[in-house]
Amino acid sequence: MEVNINSIIWDAKEWVFGYNHFQMIATVSDYWRRKVLSVLYGRGTTTRAELVKATALNTASVSLVLRELIDFGVVQPLGKLNSSGGRKSEILRLNPDAAYFLVVELAGTRNRFGFVNLGGDVRFRWEQPFPERSAVSIEHVADGIHKIFDHLSSYERSRTISIGISYTGYLTPEGELTAVHLGWEKVPAAQLLEDRVQFPVFLAPDCYLKALVEHSMGIAQGIGNYIFVSMDDGLGVGCYVDGHLLMGKHSMAGEFGHITIDPAATDPCTCGKVGCLEAIASSPNIVRQYVRRTGAAPSTLSAFAVFDHARNGDRAAMEVIDRVGGYLGLGISQLVNLLAPELIVLGGDLIEGEDLFVPRIREQISRHALAPLAGSVAIETSRLGQDIALKGAASLAFRQSLLHKAALKAICSPILIFAGGAEA
Amino acid sequence: MEVNINSIIWDAKEWVFGYNHFQMIATVSDYWRRKVLSVLYGRGTTTRAELVKATALNTASVSLVLRELIDFGVVQPLGKLNSSGGRKSEILRLNPDAAYFLVVELAGTRNRFGFVNLGGDVRFRWEQPFPERSAVSIEHVADGIHKIFDHLSSYERSRTISIGISYTGYLTPEGELTAVHLGWEKVPAAQLLEDRVQFPVFLAPDCYLKALVEHSMGIAQGIGNYIFVSMDDGLGVGCYVDGHLLMGKHSMAGEFGHITIDPAATDPCTCGKVGCLEAIASSPNIVRQYVRRTGAAPSTLSAFAVFDHARNGDRAAMEVIDRVGGYLGLGISQLVNLLAPELIVLGGDLIEGEDLFVPRIREQISRHALAPLAGSVAIETSRLGQDIALKGAASLAFRQSLLHKAALKAICSPILIFAGGAEA
């Protein structure tokens, strides 16, 4: 199956409008569209006045964009708000079904595919297990995307904009992805996929995407200085400082799991070093440390089981949790000293262990971070659920699509009613 | 003495121009001026074509700004460059004497004042020693500024734009400065000073300013991902990630000196914690560690003397340097893992100890940072000299002045010839 984004994009010249209307559209700039859409995104409902304030555009520009987007069905007016000033302000929101994104979480043996709308709802997801970590090819990923696409209605297909992919690894500036857990070395993944699926493809590291969606529509919405700490098979962070998500050279910033947290620690890490924070504070290593203390069979054990043992007073499990929480808290206190965040959001398997880890992390921050910094940082757990990486990939795809001429045009196009019935 | 910036600002309405010229000036936007000036700053010489490229403005806008600034004497054409394309491109530079900044380094017992031109040259400096750390008041600072101003020529006074101040401490969003070494707690320093000196006053932490000027005109020019590590009485960093200087909540990011570098270390820190990196890696603590090992008299010893002892094979000094370099390198490797810089610039007393510390830091980065990150980071020492904080304060004052309507107008005003003789 060939998916061609060009075939589903509205073309201004072929669309029938009255002269004035066409003229008006011709004067709306992509820059205004980008600004208005990025403010509308993730905000739930808003008003024209709020949009003017948040975009820093003038009222006329915002009105031009809104007239177009409301006409097209991309923005929905939800009625009037009673305001004290006499004039009623119109409540506006993005039509959550005005655009869709195909998303992929490249997690090695357990790759996930999903279909996410503009409102951030995962419409459906699908998991492709692999017997071996290194058996994943670009063809498998393209097949997974095609499988999802085949299940879509004509309407959904017509509003599918782009593809967002979450990875763990390194991307060169030339777009070549090295992902050890997939057995990929310098694979030009986006380009190879674009050849096979004909949608724009955007990739980013999974921790960045989790931080991004938490900032767009989660607990960190609108918070300029915050850090997302994600622990599962590995440990990583996505750091917002002064409203920017830190990327660093080759998008490699955030290797929190590989800081040497204690020069005396000898825990071996998958990276080849010893004493990495991830070699202590990650789910497989929680199991490892418990097994070493108790001789339990590792195959029957999960990190969650160790959490439960600790809750039930199992001494070895309590020791492990104390060690893991202590080092994790020490590491987080270093982030607090270096980046001065106002909020730390814990994600991944830390959510399940919130009761065990949060008090220990707080204790360590009080002990190891400078007082004015320690005193003003909040700790929360993510509430975006297990699909956070898929939601993050959709957030990425949306944001990058705003900068992609054809994709932006596809978002800002009239919603057509298909024979199959539109859901909008 | 009262200094009033308003009295020396050119007022468009009072200035005599031909009609066309005035019209042209009226259409030059402050946005264009800001863009062009910020690209010209720190660049040495440039051409019109380079300016168009770097500002992303269109050619007409750049030409309008340049025509104005060349007419005013703020930008100087230095002749034609032979280019292969036939047309010769004009070489341009900022007139280094088109603007001056009064600068202050609030360092406690040793406050420094200076006068810096647009080219970053410290025209003169003056140090005000205080018998006690906590004896410094806003009046002392204002007096120091007035002393400098009194020595200026009429020309220099007419082109003095604003004041830049380097501090160590915390600034609330309301502008209240807490600086323990000055005995200041929540002092609205900028406001109090502006009342006394009538210039716009801009403040930033000293490490940020060092990082800023290194990025503007030093070894890190144009490098988006780099970290300035400064060691003297304390230890701090200024971090550029993705082209942004990290500030964090209340401009408190960069407390590198207060990360707990080893949970087993018991070195006491001035902040009240133990095991802080600064409690090991700072000049007074280098002396402290040497004294503890040898019983030498601390009053006769400097960190530089310990460096020399180590170079001469003194065992205790070599142990201290090895310990300091080891922990400093471990800390820097954490910065490398977290922020993915391409360059580390060492400043302060580390410059004097370059031969001792750089190899040890490299070794630690190779050992503790992830291979793709460790392999691509360079280490250099700053070459901006002892006045780096003053130069940095001038860089801050320049940048902030671009955003300050009256100060920008003062920069973009015709250079007048005074009876005393202009130096331009």
Image (tube, coloured by chain):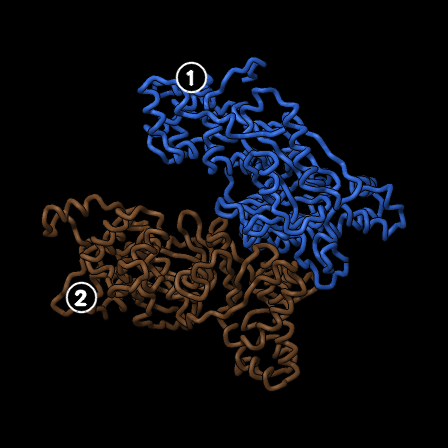
Chain colours: A brown, B blue
Marks 2 and 1, Cα distance to the nearest angstrom? 62 Å
Question: Callout 1: 10 Å neighbours few (<14), some, many (20+)?
Answer: few
> In the displayed structure, does residue B272 sit left or right of residue A144?
right
Residue at 64 percent across and 45 percent down: it is B229
Q: Nearer the viewer, residue A120 or B353?
A: A120
Residue A328 in the image: state x and y as whole percent: 60, 67
Picture coordinates of residue B347, whole percent (x, y)? 66, 40
Residue A182 or residue B86, whichever sits in front: B86
Kind of residue at disc 2:
Ser
Residue marked by disc 2 = A154
Q: Chain of mark 1?
A: B
Name the spot of residue A314 as percent of width and height, x first: 63, 85
Disc 1 element = strand
Q: Is residue B399 left or right of residue B282?
A: left
Query: Which is nearer the eye, A199 or A404?
Result: A404
| B180 or A6, nearer to the observer | B180
Q: Residue furthest bottom?
A: A312
Locate residue A410 relative to residue B194 in the image: left or right: left
x and y percentages locating residue B207 in the rendered image:
62, 44
Badge 1 is on which residue? B80
Tags 2 and 1 on a common chain: no
Q: Name the residue located 39 percent from the left edge and 24 percent from the top edge.
A: B13
Q: Quadrant of the N terminus of chain B?
A: top right
Query: Which amino acid is tagged 1?
Result: Lys
Disc 2 element: helix
Above or below A29: residue A80: below
Q: Quadrant of residue A410?
A: bottom left
Q: Quadrant of the C terminus of chain B?
A: top right
**Residue B144 shows up from this direction:** yes
Q: Is residue B149 above or below residue B81?
A: below
